Image (tube, rainbow, N blue to C red):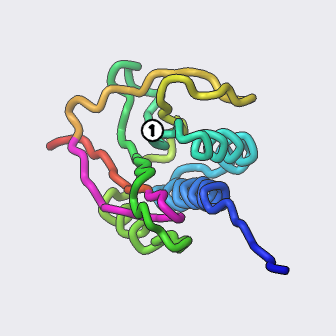
Amino acid sequence: MSTGVHVNLHTHAATHVATGMLRGLRQIIRGTGLEPAYINRRWDVLELGITQWLRSRHLTGLVLEVYDSGRPTEDDLVGRFDFTIDYGYHADGDGDLWLDSDAVDFTIRKNGSYPSRCDYHIIATTSPGRPDVPGWSTTTLRSTDGFTRHSIGTAMTGGSLGASLDYHTRSA
C-alpha cells in the first residue's frame, strides 16, 4: 500500500500572493500618510476578487491610484503604485512563498508622502473573460501622462507566481 499527498500549489500561491499584495498596499497607504480605513473595511472583498482572479489566471495587476479630489478630475492623479503579475515567474517553482517588505519600504521612501487631503482607489486589472466577483465593478485607470514610472523589481512570489512593484511620480 502506498500513500500519496497532492497539494494544489497554485491555489496556495494565489492566496499568498493576494494577501501579500494587499499587505504591501496597506504598508504603502500607511507609509505615505494615507488613511488605511478604506482598505481595512474592504479587505474581504478585495481579497476575494484578487484571489479568485489569480486562481483563474485573469489578474494582470493590482493598482493603487492616489488622487487629490480638490484638483480637476482630468489632473487629479498625484501618484500610483502597480503590482504586475507574472504567472511564469518560476515555472519550476519549489513552493517558495515570500514577500519582500524591504522592497515596499524602499518604494515608500523613494516616493515620499502625500498631503492629508489625498484619497485612493484600489483597482484590479484583468484579462478578458474574467469571472465576476461580488463587490467589484468596472472602472478606468487615470492617465499617467506626465508621470515617470520607476521599477522596483519582484516584490513577492508564490510558486510560479511573481509580482513586481512599480511606482509613478509626476515628472519634473
The one nearer the camera, 126 or 108, is 126
Q: Secondary structure at mark 1?
A: strand
**Vertically, is 152 above or below 46?**
below
In percent of the image, x 36 and y 69: which residue is there? 106
Residue lying at 33% horizontally and 50% vertically, measured from the top left = 167
Q: Amino acid at mark 1?
A: Glu
Q: Residues within 10 Å of mark 1 (few under 14, many from 20)?
A: many
Q: Residue furthest left?
A: 172
Question: In which quarter of the view is residue 76 placed?
Answer: top left
Residue 92 vs residue 139, the one in the foreground: 92
Say which of 136 and 79 sits in front.
136
Image quarter of the N terminus: bottom right
Residue 158 highlighted magenta (yes or no): yes
Per the rendered image, the range of residues in magenta is: 148-162
Q: Is residue 64 at all visible to an observer of this figure? A: no
Task: Locate residue 68: give its quadrant.
Answer: top left
Q: Which residue is mark 1?
A: 65
Which residue appears at 47% of the width and 29% of the height? 127
* Residue 128 image offset from top left, x and y in percent: 49, 24
* As drawn, 71 above or below 93: above
Question: Percent from the top left, x then y, of residue 94?
Answer: 51, 73
Q: Main structural element of the magenta stretch: helix, strand or loop?
A: strand
Q: What is the total number of numbered labels drawn onto the structure image? A: 1
Give coordinates of residue 40: x percent, y percent.
Answer: 70, 50
Coordinates of residue 20 in the picture (x, y in percent):
57, 61
Say if the magenta span includes residue 104. Answer: no
